[in-house]
Image (cartoon, rainbow, N blue to C red):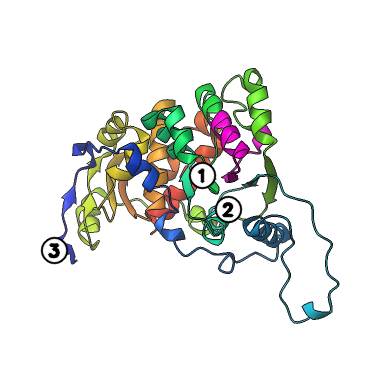
Amino acid sequence: MTSAQATTIQLTARQPRLTGEEMLASLVPPPQFDGATFETYRADDAFPSQQDSKELLQRFAAGGSQPIARAGLFSFGRKKKATEPEMKPGVYLDGGFGVGKTHLLASIYHAMPARRKYFGSFIEYTALVGALGYKNTVDLLTGSALLCIDEFELDDPGDTMVMTRLLGELVKTGTRLAATSNTPPNALGEGRFAAQDFLREIQSMSDSFQTIRIDGVDFRQRSLDEGAAVVADDEYAEALASIDGDVSDDGFDELVEHLAHVHPSRYIRLIEGVDAIGLRDVRQITDQSEALRFVAFIDRVYDAQLPIRATGLALDKVFSDEMLAGGYRKKYLRAVSRLVASTHA
C-alpha cells in the first residue's frame, strides 16, 4: 500500500468489542516474537545471568528434570552433570526493562510441545476472567500445559485474589507457569495497596515460582538517551503522510478520555488495522487512572510494533515526577522506554 492510498483513522471513533472466545484465541505471543527461540536469544557476555537463565529455561521447557547439555568445541570431554532437582511448576523472570525477558518467555512458549498453551499479558488474563467469569475461565484453562504471563503486576486487591486463586487451581491440575515482571513475586503489590492484608495470597503464589534474576542493560537505552522524538506542529501532517499504510490521528486529550470508556482488554482491537499512531498536543498526565490506562494502551501499541508520531510535550515526559516516584514507578518507566523506542521507529 502506498501513502496515497492510506486511510486516516480516528481511534476515538472506534467502539471495539471482543468476546471471551476471541480473547482466549488471541492469547499468543505478539507478532515481533513469532519467531523467538532460545537460539535467537543473544546473551550479553557482560551479564552471565542471561546465559544461565537461558539454559535454566531450556531445561524448564524440556520438562524440568534434566540439565541442558552445553554444546561446544570442548563439550565432549566434560563430565556429565548429576540430575538436577525438579523445578517448581512456575518460573518467574525478574529483571529490568529490555533485557530480553519477553523474548525468553516466548521461547518457552515455542519450545514446549503442547497443543494447549497460552501467552498473554497480566491484564489480558484478568480481562478474560472479567468477560467469562471466574469459574468459566478456570474450566477453559484447566488441562492447558502452559500459561505464559507477561508483565505480571498486581495493581489492586481484586486482581491479587483473582490471579493467585486462578493460578493455584491450574497448578494443582498440572499446568505449568512462566511469568515476567520487574518486581519479585514476594514484593508484588508493594507500595500500591495494603499488601500485608493479602500476604497469604501473595506468598501462596510466590511459592509456585522459581525466581530467575536476569541482569543487563535496556536494549532500548540508545534511544532513551536521545529522548522521545517530537514532531513540529507544521510538520505533523507530512510526517503521517510519509508512512505507508493506515495511520491514526487523534488529539491526546481526546484519546486519553476515550480510553476511559474502552476496557483495556479491548485496546488490542482499538488499534487493529492501524500501521502507525498519530497524537496531537501531548501533555503531561497527572491523574493516576488516566496514566495507567495510557500505559496499558502503549503496551498494546508496542506489542504491535507501531511507530508513534506526536506533537506537543515529548512522550518521555508524559508522566509527572510524582508518578515516577510512586508505587507504579516501574510500570511508568517501562512505558517511557517503549514510548521513546516507538517515536524513533
Q: Considering only vertical position in the picture, is 155 above or below 87?
A: above
Secondary structure under badge 1? helix
Can you give x and y, in whole percent of width and height, for residue 282 in the image? Answer: 32, 40
Q: Quadrant of the N terminus?
A: bottom left
Given residues 207 and 43, the one toward you in this image is 207
In the picture of the structure, the residue carrying the numbered disc 3 is: 4
Can you give x and y, in whole percent of width and height, for residue 218 in the image? Answer: 57, 54
Q: Which residues are magenta?
A: 163-186
**In the image, what residue type sits under mark 2?**
Lys
Viewed as shown, does residue 335 lie left or right of 165?
left
* Residue located 54% across and 22% down the image: 157
In the picture of the structure, the residue carrying the numbered disc 2 is: 101
Viewed as shown, does residue 210 lie left or right of 219?
right
Secondary structure under badge 3? helix
The image quadrant that residue 107 belongs to is bottom right
Q: Considering only vertical position in the picture, is 334 above or below 98?
A: above
**In the image, what residue type sits under mark 1?**
Arg
**In the image, what residue type sits under mark 3?**
Ala
Can you give x and y, in whole percent of width and height, for residue 307 in the image? Answer: 34, 55
**Residue 178 painted magenta:** yes
| Within-10-Å neighbours for mark 3: few <14, some 14–19, many 20+ | few
Camera-side mark, 2 or 3: 2
Secondary structure under badge 2? helix
Q: Quadrant of the C terminus?
A: bottom left
In the picture of the structure, the residue carrying the numbered disc 1 is: 334
